[in-house]
Amino acid sequence: MILGMSLSTYTTIHVVLSLIAIFTGFIVVFGLFASKKLKGMTAIFLLTSVLTSAGGFLFPNDHITPGIILGILSLIVLLIAIIARYALHLSGASRGIYAVTAVMALYFNFFALVAQGFGKVPALHSLAPTGKEPPFFIAQGIALVMFIVFGIFAAKKFHPGNQPPARP
């Protein structure tokens, strides 16, 4: 039992939160490319990312796993993103810091999705049963390059104060 739920129920909720974080994260990141703050979507992305990262620590483990390390890194990045977005209001350098950390938070969620895919989806698992085979590293390498490009593009393009006023 975790938080009064069966492990199965808790896992389902954790997966749903993770998928919401990834889905809304892509919307937020593509919004950054267009200099849009997307207030509501950003709040959902950051909240579900925090919940899924923190919630991962509640799964039963008898040692530190790569998932725990990823969760710690994710929470640090999310804290920085939240401070830059909500406490510093994207002023000065916090604009770029927010753009990069938002992309990093999405990358960490996506990294976990790929890792879980190789662990749980039979077709992928057969390609990399231990997670140490080339297909796993190729998939994660492609994701890493993609998110590095996203981070650079987001930092360069996200200038929400430079938008023309909305038409009535």
Image (cartoon, helix red, strand yellow):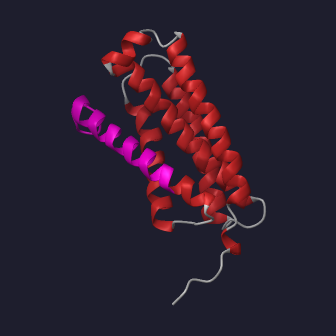
Name of the residue lying farthest toward the right = 92
Residue 138: which quarter of the image? top right
> Which quadrant, please, contains the N terminus?
top left
Nearer to us in this view, 6 or 99: 99
Q: Residue at x 73, y 67 (%)?
A: 91
Nearer to us in this view, 67 or 32: 32
Q: Residue at x 61, y 37 (%)?
A: 146
Residue 120 % position (x, y): 34, 21
Name of the residue lying farthest toward the front = 167
Residue stretch in magenta: 1-27
Nearer to us in this view, 108 or 73: 108
Q: Residue at x 65, y 50 (%)?
A: 80
Residue 162: which quarter of the image? bottom right
Nearer to us in this view, 82 or 100: 100
Q: Is residue 62 above or below residue 85?
A: above
Residue 93 % position (x, y): 78, 59
**Tag count:** 0
Residue 76 among those drawn in magenta = no
Whether residue 163 sits left or right of residue 109 in the image: it is right
Residue 76: which quarter of the image? top right
Residue 15 among those drawn in magenta = yes
Q: Is residue 7 above or below residue 147?
A: above
Residue 47 % position (x, y): 45, 53
Whether residue 97 sits left or right of residue 4 in the image: it is right
Q: Is residue 54 above or below residue 26?
A: above
Residue 63 % position (x, y): 48, 17
Q: Main secondary structure of the magenta part?
A: helix
